Amino acid sequence: MNMELALQTFFDESRELLTDMERILLQLESFPGDAELRNALFRCVHTVKGSAGIFGFQHVVSFTHVVENVLDRLRTEEIHLSQLLADLLLRCRDHISLLVDIADPEDAVRLASASQRLLTELGPFHSVTPPQTPQAVVADSHQQHQWRLSVQIAADALRFGMDPLGFIGYLSRLGQLQVTTSSQAVPCLAELEPESCYLSFELALTTDASEALIKEAFELGNDLYQVQLECVQSAQLAKLSAGPPNDSSPELLARTIDKDAGQAHRRKPPAQHFRVQADKLDRLINLVGELVIASASVSLNAGHSGDAVSRESAANLNLLVEDIRNSSLELRMVAIGETFQRFQRVVRDLSAEIGKDIQLDITGAETELDKTVVEKIGDPLMHLVRNACDHGIELPAVRQQKGKLAQGLVQLNAYHESGAIVIEVNDDGNGLNRQKILAKAKEKHLLTGDGHLSDSEVFNLIFEPGFSTVEQVTNLSGRGVGMDVVKRNIEALRGSVELISPGTLGGTTFRIRLPLTLAIIDGFLARVGDATYVVPLDLVVECTELPKALCNADVVSTSHYINLRDEVLPIILLREHFMQPGTSGRRQNIIVVRHGAHKVGLVVDELLGEQQTVIKPLSGIFSHVKGLSGSTILGSGQVSLILDVPALLQQVSQREDSLDRSNNRHVRAPLAAC
Amino acid sequence: MKQSKRNDVVVMQTEQANEQQYLTFQLGQEMFAVGILHIREIIEYGNLTTVPLMPDFVSGVINLRGSVVPVIDLSIRFSRGQSQLSRRTCIVILEVDSAVSCAADSGSEVSALQEVGIIVDAVSEVLEIAPKDIEPAPTFGTRLRAEFIAGMGKVDGAFVILLNVQKALNVEEMAKLASVVEPLEQSHYG
Amino acid sequence: MSYFCHFNAEQGCLRVQGELTIYQASATLQAFRAACASMQLTQLDLSQVTDFDSAGLQLLLALKKSAPEVQLRHHSDAVIKVLSLTNLMTELDLDPLSGGV
């Protein structure tokens, strides 16, 4: 482990800890009595401070020291978490994250005045004397203790990148440190193993720092260090050593420290992680993609050869490749929770700013989706959440007038549904005012003509560029940009967004539907004329032969609907839709696909079965094509096109609505599965 | 640094050697030529996948060792009717700079190269045409948009049309043309 | 980044230049062994040591154990820092008061 790597780990971990800190603080506001939360909060800051100390980031240490002290008093219930203190601590958290990010102590100067301001504000809450420098911290004498430490170091420590100079340096900054280095074990040159460690240390430390803080010095070393820690002044063995003072062997103490660490682990979710560079992972996924194509080609050739043995080998290979594909895609799957969590803070700050009382409820935080999708969904979600707070939720007084609770509720929810992840942003506010939106749309010339529009069409006008219904422009949303950007961003991820609202009855839900992954999918192949299309298998509900009576092209193309087992099913004739030449064969098949609540039947000439496919984006001259989401290469080497089912469904629903209007007849596809 | 400089020199030399070399091919009765530096490879015609809702000049896409490459029927693009397929028909894969507007004039670094295939009736040969044998493009008489022509090369007393690949296969322009074609259903809306 | 050991046999002086850390430990050990074997080593010049860690420290301790007569000279700041932190100044020929030789 070299220094750079260790530093990177420090940055990553600090960021995670600070994220935790924010989450816990927000939780603590709702559950101030939860001792476990208070402890966890303390541990976050404590660990950041400890690691920063190891790397000698004084600017981080001196600031976090005070925050840590406040949190320590909070956890021992000397002080209580008021709204004011919570605000302050959140700002301190932001400041710590700034401090951690600059890393170079030289640059810390420009944050010094901000540090000082926050420290002044923290004044009433902490019990440390002004801690300009760690030396000053040490100078606080009324809590000083003398500690004796005896440290045995595993022979492999240096090889693992653990240099004892690290903890000595750290401890020397905590207070007055006397070091006795035991070098007897160092052999002569002839016997020296240059990378083994032969040193051990006896240390005497005078400090006001807590025992936990001292132990922090050895945290990175895991089991490479065996530490015996003893508080001399009070002539008591440190609390952690359970055994009688003189018998306490290093092993015993090491075990107790381990046990302590083990408990800390149990409190956290028991996940073991391994950091991997993202581009290595991407390369792996690309290679797996090629492997999928190659394996499809092997199966095809084996099938043609007619040799039973090679067919069987190919089948085995296929199974393995499928496993590899799934496992490697899983590597990129992350829970959406972390993204959701960010919004707690957003909602809290925003509601304070606009004078509303809003609670954010999160469900489905553990729902997983592809990392690349997660990265790109943050901004659209941010906009929707802000929109819900700003435009959706009413002011407390207004809510009470309406007989609602003064506190508004915004909900973030995620769940999996047929190969997609669904994310809902829901508020219990105003709802949408049809008349207002219509008026606005006309004013902005987004609407031409006076055609009758369905509610859903009216509501979806807010996704048009340049639309905003709020007169008063706040500094957060309502600038009239955004909703169209939200929609575009989501569509760029092969997803869709719809707006559900019972109108002025109140409440609005944005439902975003995204594919789980952008790289590889299971596809269902179908032939239309001489073209082969791929339908994402997750969206396929069933495949069936089109009833003979309906095969007459005229009948089908004029009706747009068929009766499938007494169910009205809208259909798309792909041949007609894509304006392909030629006439359909005598036998036609239907692939019933579903996206969200909508179902549609795709009429094709022939069903060719399932195949894993690697998505190759259609770019360049095909960038404007509608109804196709990409292409893929089949085992035969032929290129096949992937149907964009959401886009096709949208076209159907538009067709349906226009039929609604012209025929004054209500036809909808029943929701029940067939 | 040293390393890359040396490489640059090598590239420059080969570029000079190739700069005057052109691949000539037949389209109907006419001879065209494309600078050899634009050419990636020449492959047999076949295995085309038609992309629906595209203008006629986009014949489809092919799989070129794992990447999906669009194929253009140059004959239709040049308003000369659809190519007649024969045994000699082939696809010439060219590299086109897809961020044309900025790079073509300033001569700055080539940004996004995209592969595009063109269907030609027959590939003839690789010729050396010296700059002195190249006449500026005539403003009329070629039945071709003037900007598609880089010049007229004199070969054995006859003229061949040297194509301006960047203009004739302008990705941006072709994408715009492609977006005009809309599925039928769209017209119902609004 | 550069590292090398230079042994001036005439003066019996071995000079370590650059980093003296675990990354160079193996090479430095070879150099120390060779210099000791020549029987001419009298002093080790540490003035050019830019980086120094526990592995480097152990090498100096081992050298002292094998050849107590060899004098360590001209400790660089990097070396002084570690020796004062570990309280090994006298053992490794650093005058605690002057902070260097």
Image (cartoon, coloured by chain):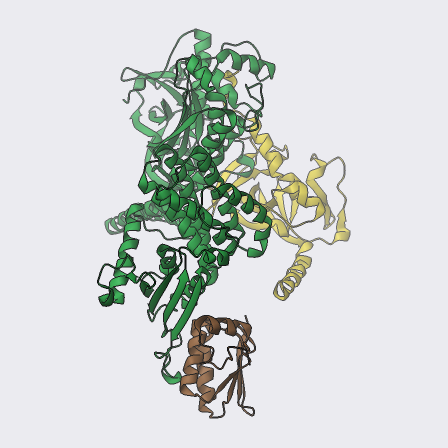
Q: Color used for chain C?
A: brown
Residue A131 shows up from this direction: yes
Q: Out of B121 and A278, give the one closest to the viewer.
A: A278
Quadrant (top left/top right/bottom left/bottom right) for the N terminus of chain A: bottom left
Residue A583 shows up from this direction: no
Q: Color used for chain A?
A: green
From this view, report whether residue A356 is shown above or below residue B11.
above
Q: Out of A143 and A290, give the one closest to the viewer.
A: A143
Q: Out of A538 and A633, give the one closest to the viewer.
A: A538
Q: Position of residue A561 (x, y in %)?
A: 37, 16
From this view, report whether residue B54 is shown above or below residue B120.
above
Q: Color used for chain B?
A: yellow
Q: Position of residue A590 (x, y in %)?
A: 34, 25
Residue at 38% across, 57% down: A216
Seen as rendered, the residue at the extreme top is: A664
| Quarter of the rendering containing residue B79 | top right
Q: Position of residue A409 (x, y in %)?
A: 40, 24
From this view, report whether residue A151 is shown above or below residue C9.
above
